[in-house]
Image (tube, grey):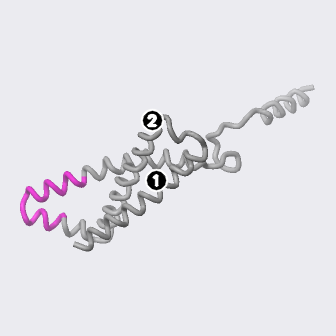
Amino acid sequence: MAENTTASKSAQIAARPLSPFMLGPYYKFQLTSVLSFAHRLTGLGLSMGTVLIAIWVLAAAAGPWSYAQFAQVARSIPGEVLLFAWSWALLYHLCNGIRHLVWDTVHGFDLKNTYLGGYLVVALSLVLTAAVWIVAFAF
């Protein structure tokens, strides 16, 4: 009889709906959740990047030697990768913020427009980042 009760409880547990937060074969990532997570991460990255901008301004104010030291680090490969990532984060966060402003006007909530807007945000942020870097190297 104890076996029958255990089997019955196992069947009840297996029949329960799964949490959408379970990873693996149970939950498929959606574009909207990935973009929401990216928006939060880029906001965090922009906060950290603002600290680096403050260090840049302080180095410039401290004199030529301090600024030269900072410029040497900023012009290194890791420094340029960090600056590129920060510029993309800024432009992605801007584009996604505009998308949220459109949503505030109660437009674009259907599934087709939500995905279209998501793809547009990603593409536009990449194009704008490339344009900023092309203009930066042109001058």
Sequence-earlier tag: 1 or 2 = 2
Residue 111 is tagged as none
Report how far apart the C-alphas of labels 1 and 2 lie in the structure: 17 Å
Residue identifier under label 1? 121
* Residue 54 located within the stretch drawn in magenta: yes
**In the image, is 135 to the left or to the right of 71?**
right
Identify whether 95 is placed above or below 60. above
Taking 72 as reference, is 121 above or below it? above
The residue depicted at 67 percent of the width and 50 percent of the height is: 24
Q: Nearer the viewer, residue 79 or 122?
A: 122
Q: Which residues are magenta?
A: 52-70
Indicate left or right for 126 with 86 as reference: right
Q: In the figure, 106 relative to 85: above or below?
A: above
**Residue type beneath disc 2:** Thr
Residue placed under numbered mark 2 in the picture: 105
Depth order, front residue of 10/45: 45
Instruction: Say if the magenta span includes residue 89.
Output: no
* Direction bottom: furthest residue: 138
In the image: residue 82, left or right of residue 14: left
Please, what secondary structure does the residue beneath circle 1 have?
Answer: helix
**Residue 7: horizontal and vertical position, in percent?**
87, 33
Which of the image's four quarters has the N terminus?
top right
- The answer to whether residue 28 is left or right of residue 12 is left
| Image point (13%, 63%), residue name | 67
Q: Nearer the viewer, mark 1 or mark 2?
A: 2
